[in-house]
Image: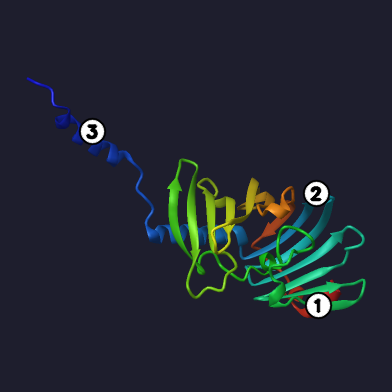
Amino acid sequence: MSFHPSATLPPLFALMLLLLPPALSAATVEELIKKVEENLNGSTAVMELSMTVTTKRVKRTMTMKSWSIGTEKSFIKILYPGKDKGITFLKVDNSLWQYIPRIEKTIKIPASMMLQSWMGSDFTNDDLVRESSISTDYTHKLLTESEEDYQVELLPTEEAAVVWGKIIMVISKEFLLPSTIQYFDEDGELIRELFYSDVQSFGSRMYPTKWQMLPREKEKEGHSTSIEISNAVFDQEVSAAYFSKRALKRF
């Protein structure tokens, strides 16, 4: 009897297909992004953190404390260094205010300044406001999948007023948290990358305690901003007193 490879390959190929993990459906990818957003925010959060800003000329560190309710309300107080101590920020919905104790003045940050640097870092005022939602303002497409993670492409919906033309997110399967986020402009140019690492437990929630933002624009070569979270409490009641304009001076 002669040997015909064609007689044996199709069944083997069919078996290999059966052993492959099923691809995520569009609906499943959307649920994945919703879960990631939920894991990053929590219903409430109180955090103590430090931020180190590195440029070609200088390296400086600030410490601060933040209080937040979901993505709608947040309050941040600078604790160190002395020249910035007492500066506070209040975000309610899509509005952002800053109080500067040195001049005893409250300033509302206008929409035209949302892309400006926040406290000299590689994060922007828009990052604080977090006006856009990765689950509702973007469409989602699974690009690749490995044993460790998913890579998902996020494209803005037609009606969404968002900053980025495209976002590529790598999501850890173990924690359902992002490990890398790439931000592209409308021309498809990579503008910056955000890396999350050192996931630790805070109560029942797992959370990345180290963030590093690296700008990829040529004029910002050598710049970086690192955030390290030293303590965090999630999903416990946070006083509403933090989320009024009066709080900017009071706290």
Front one among 69 and 57 = 57
Secondary structure at numbered mark 2: loop
Secondary structure at numbered mark 1: strand
Q: Is 132 rendered above or below residue 82? A: below
The mark that comes first in sequence, 2 or 1, is: 2
Residue 137 appears left or right of 46: left
Q: Which residue is mark 2?
A: 56
Q: Which residue is mark 3?
A: 12
**Which amino acid, by three-letter code, is at mark 2?**
Lys
Mark 1, residues whose alpha carbon is within 10 Å: few (<14), some, or many (≥20)? few
Residue 56 appears left or right of 158: right
Label placed on residue 107:
1
**Which amino acid, by three-letter code, is at mark 1?**
Ile
Note whether residue 154 is visible: yes
Front one among 101 and 35 = 101
Gap in Å between the C-alphas at discs 2 and 3? 58 Å
Residue at the spot x=63%, y=49% of the render? 195
Residue 194 appears left or right of 249: left
**Which amino acid, by three-letter code, is at mark 3?**
Leu
Note whether residue 176 is visible: no
The mark that comes first in sequence, 3 or 1, is: 3
